[in-house]
C-alpha cells in the first residue's frame, strides 16, 4: 500500500509541522511556538515500510516518529470547523476511501548536525529534511478505526530499545488548527485516483501529506540499526506499524564542518 502511495505521491507536498510537542521543543532547547510553523519535504524522500534509510556521509541522523494526515479534498483558508472534511487516506479494509478521514504512521528523519549548522547561518531546512529515503511511511488507517486522533500512542524502538513513547494528546496545536494554518498559506491539494491491485476492491487517492510533529525522545540512528514504530489507541490496541533499517549511503552528499 505505501509503495503505491510513493509511486503516485510525486505530484503533491509533504508538509511537516515543527515543534508541535512541548517536551520535544524543550529537549532541543527551543521555545514552544506561539503559532504553528512548517517546512516542506520532497516526495522523493518517501520510503515504504521495510525499506532502508540511507544515511549520507558525515551526517548524524535522528529519528522523529509522527502521525501523518493525507489530504483528500483540496482547499485553502479552511476553517477548523471544516478541517476534518478535507482529510483522506488509504487503507486495505474498506471499499471506498475518496473522502474518508485517515491517518498514517511516518518518520521524519533529520540530519541533526547539518540542522545545527544551517540554523546558525539562518538558512532553510530543505537539505536537513530532504535527503532521499528520509520519510519512511507505513500503511494507512480509516476514521472508523480511530475514535479520537488526539488520544493515540506513538512509539519508536531502535534495536528493540524504546526511544520515543508519546501521545497525540500532547500536541500543542491540534489537527484542525494545523490544517487551518497551513491552508491559510498554501492551498492543500490532492492528486488523481489510481486503481489498487485486485485483492483490494477500492481506489487510492493521493494528496498532500501533513506530518503533525514528534514527541520527545528523538535521537540518532546509525548504519545497521533497525527501527520499529507503532501507533496504538487508548486501549493499547496496535493500529499501525512501520519498520526500516539504516544503511550508509554510498556517494552523494558529504557533511563538512566549517
Image: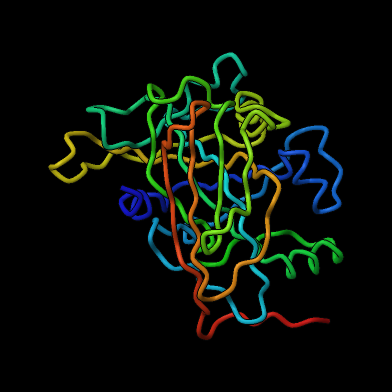
The image shows residue 243, relative to residue 198, as above or below, that is below
Q: Residue 201 at x, y = what percent?
A: 16, 34
Left or right position of 66 against 21: left
Total count of labels: 0
Q: Quadrant of residue 187?
A: top right
Asked if one can make out residue 127 in the rendered structure from this viewpoint, the answer is: no
Q: Residue furthest bottom?
A: 251
Q: How is the image coloured?
A: rainbow
The image shows residue 233, relative to residue 61, as above or below, that is above
Asked if one can make out residue 106 in the rendered structure from this viewpoint, the answer is: yes
Q: Residue 198 at x, y = what percent?
A: 13, 42
* Residue at x 68%, y 71% (from the top left corner): 60
Quarter of the C terminus within the rendering: bottom right
Left or right position of 92 against 70: left
Q: Residue 162 at x, y = what percent?
A: 59, 53
* Residue at x 86%, y 52% (from the top left corner): 29
Q: Quadrant of residue 221?
A: bottom right
* Residue at x 66%, y 42% (from the top left corner): 17
Q: Residue 74 at x, y = what percent?
A: 47, 30
The image shows residue 246, relative to residue 212, as above or below, that is below
* Residue at x 50%, y 60% (from the top left corner): 227
Could you say which is closer to the camera, residue 45 or residue 148? 148
Q: Residue furthest left?
A: 198
Could you say which is closer to the camera, residue 99 or residue 67? 67
Amino acid at each position: 500500500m505505501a509503495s503505491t502511495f510513493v509511486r503516485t505521491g510525486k505530484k503533491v507536498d509533504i508538509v511537516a509541522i515543527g515543534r508541535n510537542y512541548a517536551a520535544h521543543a524543550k529537549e532541543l532547547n527551543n521555545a514552544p511556538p506561539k503559532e504553528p510553523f512548517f517546512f516542506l519535504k520532497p516526495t522523493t524522500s518517501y520510503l515504504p515500510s521495510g525499506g532502508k534509510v540511507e544515511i549520507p556521509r558525515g551526517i548524524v541522523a535522528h529519528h522523529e516518529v509522527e502521525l501523518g494526515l493525507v489530504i483528500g479534498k483540496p482547499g485553502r483558508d479552511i476553517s477548523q470547523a471544516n478541517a476534518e472534511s478535507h482529510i483522506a487516506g488509504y487503507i486495505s479494509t474498506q471499499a471506498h476511501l475518496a473522502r474518508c478521514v485517515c491517518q498514517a504512521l511516518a518518520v521524519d528523519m533529520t540530519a541533526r548536525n547539518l540542522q545545527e549548522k544551517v540554523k546558525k547561518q539562518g538558512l532553510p531546512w530543505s537539505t536537513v529534511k530532504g535527503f532521499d529515503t528520509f520519510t519512511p511511511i507505513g500503511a494507512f488507517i480509516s476514521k472508523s478505526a480511530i475514535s479520537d486522533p488526539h488520544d493515540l500512542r506513538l512509539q519508536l524502538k531502535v534495536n528493540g530499545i524504546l526511544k520515543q513513547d508519546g501521545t497525540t494528546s500532547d500536541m500543542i496545536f491540534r489537527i484542525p488548527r494545523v490544517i487551518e494554518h497551513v491552508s491559510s498559506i498554501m492551498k492543500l491539494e490532492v492528486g488523481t485516483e489510481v486503481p489498487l491491485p485486485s485483492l483490494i476492491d477500492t481506489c487510492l487517492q493521493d494528496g498532500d501529506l501533513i506530518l503533525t510533529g514528534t514527541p520527545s525522545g528523538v535521537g540518532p540512528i546509525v548504519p545497521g540499526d533497525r527501527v520499529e514504530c507503532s501507533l496504538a489507541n487508548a486501549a493499547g490496541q496496535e493500529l499501525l506499524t512501520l519498520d526500516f533499517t539504516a544503511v550508509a549511503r554510498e556517494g552523494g552528499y558529504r557533511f563538512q564542518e566549517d
